Image: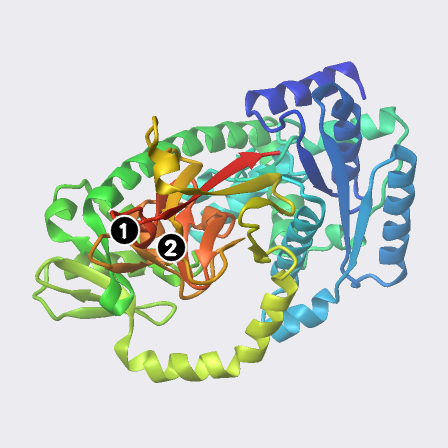
């Protein structure tokens, strides 16, 4: 790659700490210019930065022979670059029809699922996509047109969770110039030239006019604005986090959240809105279709008497109480929910089977060592008598080393991810709390909850490594045998 552009990307990766030594990176490669450029960039840097590259290609089965040619091209390219390649075949048109989604949305879901599958299979910890500056500018304009507000102005983030975008520092023109100079071929998707999709209309009709007739630096300026908006958004999120800790509490009786009026009233309007939006999204487990009108409806309840309510998307309802506003499931929708669960039972079972490889439960060897696949983590278990454990030293109780009352463990322990119905005993009186409510209280981001490993006895959580152990398994005066569990990175 040309030194100037290669150095630019390398510095961008370093600036955002996208890649660390030992990382395994799943890279989406369609065969188009952007993804081919990304693959070559990563291959040039992999030895210097000490990481591995794994390619994921999805054949959407939308373009017949052209799609087969793209697949063959990507396979051959990976062979030449000595990169592992995983191919997926998905009937996106059928998936879109069955899920009542657009082809664009169905395609995104399919690709996201494919990336996650490769991560589980290979133990990869990063996903790299080939978004660039023009993509970001298009996203910002699209979000503004749809009325998404400040968050939409943030556009595409360089790093979001385990997703990284190393080419966000380059324009589409820079990418194509480099490929031409290096004489690297790539595939062309003719659907990108059509104006059927909204994004394509922005790409072909709006941005070119802005660049040609208003300012040639339009894309650069939109990207600069996007970075400023992201800094503001991050600050507001930190303030919302603090407000959440002080103001929002779970309501276990209705599986909902309560916004306390006392703390809420002291917040500025922008934080009140963000707090309400977060509560709705948390309960809905989604962000789509949560609009300003719903936020304002909940805000209005704080000026009404107790008992007043407003219906919200995703079968939610906000209800004014004496203490504040509670957001939970609509009570009259219980029968609807029951029927939905029955109708969707087969689909849920299929989804669970698909996830089985990455969500397995591994029984602990007690005493002994147990490895959990794909995480690089080892669980070391040791049994000792009480006198032996306390002689000369305190019982070790560290973030990743805990001691438990082995006498009360009736069945074997396992290490696994969370499941519906998981509970945690939170005090010596035996009070239980749903694991989901505990995570909400501790402000654990939703995207991290499914990746957290747990030590469990059936549906009873024994320990959340790095966070909290169950009060039910604490060592007491009657304890004779102690189980010491230590989690280490291999």
Residue 457 at x, y = what percent?
Answer: 44, 59
Does the CB distance between marks 1 and 2 fall below 8 Å? yes
Name the residue rendered at 65%, 47% in the picture: 373
In the picture of the structure, the residue carrying the numbered disc 2 is: 407
Instruction: Give the distance between the C-alpha atoms of the residues marked 1 and 2, in whole angstroms.
Output: 9 Å
Answer above or below: position of 205 versus 157.
below
Residue 68 coordinates in the image, percent (x, y): 88, 57
Task: Residue 349 in the image: state x and y as whole percent.
Answer: 58, 73
Name the residue: 55% across, 44% down. 139
Q: Position of residue 359 (x, y in %)?
A: 58, 57
Q: Earlier in the sequence, mark 1 or mark 2?
A: 2
Specify the label residue 478 is tagged with: 1
The quarter of the picture where residue 94 lies is bottom right
| Mark linked to residue 152 | none
Front one among 477 and 39: 477
Q: Residues within 10 Å of mark 1 (few under 14, many from 20)?
A: few
Residue at point 38% right, 59% down?
Answer: 290
In the image, 133: left or right of 155?
Answer: right
Residue at 65 percent of width and 38 percent of height: 131
Please rate how many residues cluster around mark 2, counting C-alpha atoms within 10 Å: few if below 14, some from 14 to 19, many from 20.
some
In the image shown, does 487 or 197 lie closer to the viewer? 487
Q: Is 254 in front, or is 275?
A: 254
């Amino acid at each position: 790659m040309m030194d100037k552009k290669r150095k630019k990307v390398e510095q961008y990766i370093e600036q955002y700490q996208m890649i660390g030594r030992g990382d395994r990176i799943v890279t989406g490669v369609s065969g188009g210019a952007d993804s081919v450029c990304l693959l070559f960039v990563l291959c040039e840097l992999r030895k210097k930065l000490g990481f591995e590259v794994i390619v994921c290609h999805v054949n959407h089965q939308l373009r017949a022979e052209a799609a087969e040619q793209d697949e063959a091209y990507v396979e051959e390219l990976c062979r030449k670059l000595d990169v592992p390649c995983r191919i997926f075949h998905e009937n996106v048109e059928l998936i879109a029809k069955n899920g009542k989604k657009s082809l664009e949305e169905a395609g995104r879901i399919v690709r996201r699922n494919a990336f996650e599958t490769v991560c589980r299979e290979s133990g990869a910890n990063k996903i790299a996509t080939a978004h660039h500056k023009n993509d970001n500018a298009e996203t910002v304009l699209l979000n503004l047109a749809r009325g998404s507000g400040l968050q939409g102005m943030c556009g595409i983030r360089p790093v979001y969770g385990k997703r990284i975008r190393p080419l966000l520092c380059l324009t589409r023109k820079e990418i194509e110039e480099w490929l031409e100079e290096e004489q690297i071929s790539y595939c062309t998707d003719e659907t990108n030239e059509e104006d059927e999709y909204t994004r394509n209309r922005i790409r072909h009709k709006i941005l070119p006019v802005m660049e040609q007739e208003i300012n040639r630096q339009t894309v650069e300026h939109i990207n600069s604005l996007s970075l400023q908006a992201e800094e503001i958004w991050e600050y507001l999120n930190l303030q919302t986090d603090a407000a959440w800790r002080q103001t929002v509490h779970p309501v276990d009786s209705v599986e909902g959240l309560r916004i306390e009026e006392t703390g809420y009233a002291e917040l500025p309007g922008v934080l009140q809105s963000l707090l309400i939006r977060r509560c709705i999204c948390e309960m809905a487990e989604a962000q789509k279709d949560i609009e300003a009108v719903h936020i304002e409806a909940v805000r209005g309840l704080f000026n009404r008497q107790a008992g007043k309510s407003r219906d919200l998307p995703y079968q939610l309802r906000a209800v004014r109480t004496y203490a504040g506003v509670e957001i939970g499931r609509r009570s009259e929708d219980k029968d609807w929910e029951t029927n939905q669960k029955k109708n969707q039972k087969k689909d849920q079972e299929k989804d669970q089977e698909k996830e089985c490889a990455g969500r397995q439960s591994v029984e602990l060897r007690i005493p002994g060592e147990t490895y959990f696949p794909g995480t690089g983590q080892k669980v070391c278990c040791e049994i000792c008598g009480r006198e032996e454990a306390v002689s000369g030293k305190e019982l070790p109780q560290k973030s990743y080393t805990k001691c438990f009352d082995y006498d009360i463990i009736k069945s074997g322990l396992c290490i696994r991810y969370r499941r519906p119905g998981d509970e945690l005993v939170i005090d010596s009186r035996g009070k239980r709390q749903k694991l989901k409510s505990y995570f909400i209280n501790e402000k654990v981001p939703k995207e991290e909850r499914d990746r957290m490993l747990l030590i469990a006895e059936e549906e009873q959580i024994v320990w959340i490594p790095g966070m909290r152990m169950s009060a039910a398994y604490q060592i007491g005066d009657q304890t004779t045998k102690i189980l010491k569990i230590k989690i280490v990175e291999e």
